[in-house]
Amino acid sequence: MTETKPVEPTAGTPANVYDHSAPAATATAATKADGDVEAQKAAPAAAASAYDDEAGKSIGIAMFICIVVGFALGWIGGGIGSWISFICLIAAIVLSSTITCGCCCGSNLNLNPKVKRWSTSTLLCLVIQWVLAIIAIFIAYGGAAMGDTTGASIGVATALLVVTQILYILAGVFAGVFTWGRKSCGNA
């Protein structure tokens, strides 16, 4: 929470205005006291990052593996492939929501907010993919049950399933960037 301090009223500024800006950084003993502005600017950047660059990597690897295995087994089809794909999808949703929401084992992760966004993007892709897949199944079965002879419901369901596969691939990309592409994408 940022510190709020009253602002001194000036001409045209009401007395009840508060300054919500971040507190200004103070110069440390390591910076030059001779007023060297460049040395004072370099000191905060030279300090170690407040975020852990390796935080959540093992969870990210597990999330990426669940997404890849679920995507691959979803294409195999059949009884066992579809069920394992479904279980992998749910596991990936749980893992990404653990990182995004900061619950369970994700509560002590000291993640950079820019890195955490990749996990949030993964979670959004997986949840939207899951919802669209359920809608596509209901449309396909509903059309077949109602005697759809034109194939319109199957066409719509097929289009939705193509979108779900694109979202599955995007989720894998986002999980990979969360896990391995932190520095290369300028996020750490």
Image: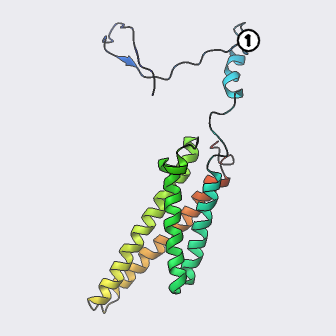
Which residue does the numbered mark 1 point to in the structure image?
32
Q: Pick whichever, 177 or 151, lies toward us.
A: 177
Q: Pick whichever, 21 or 155, lies toward us.
A: 21
At which x and y percent is residue 92? Answer: 53, 63
Residue drawn at point x = 55 percent, y = 47 percent: 116
For residue 143, side relative to residue 101 (left or right) = left
Q: Residue furthest front?
A: 104
Q: The C terminus appears in which quarter of the rendering?
A: top right
Q: The N terminus appears in which quarter of the rendering?
A: top left
Can see residue 177?
no
Taking 131 as reference, is 144 above or below it? Answer: below
For residue 166, side relative to residue 138 (left or right) = right
Mark 1, other Cα within 10 Å: few <14 / some 14–19 / many ≥20: some
User: Callout 1, which amino acid?
Assistant: Lys
Q: Residue furthest left?
A: 146
Residue drawn at point x = 66 percent, y = 34 percent: 49
- Kindly state the secondary structure of the residue where label 1 is placed: loop
Residue 169 found in image quarter: bottom right
Can see residue 8?
yes
Residue drawn at point x = 42 percent, y = 22 percent: 20
Taking 83 as reference, is 65 above or below it? Answer: above
Residue 27 found in image quarter: top right
At which x and y percent is residue 62? Answer: 61, 61
At which x and y percent is residue 130? Answer: 43, 68
Taking 167 as reference, is 160 above or below it? Answer: below
Residue 134 found in image quarter: bottom left
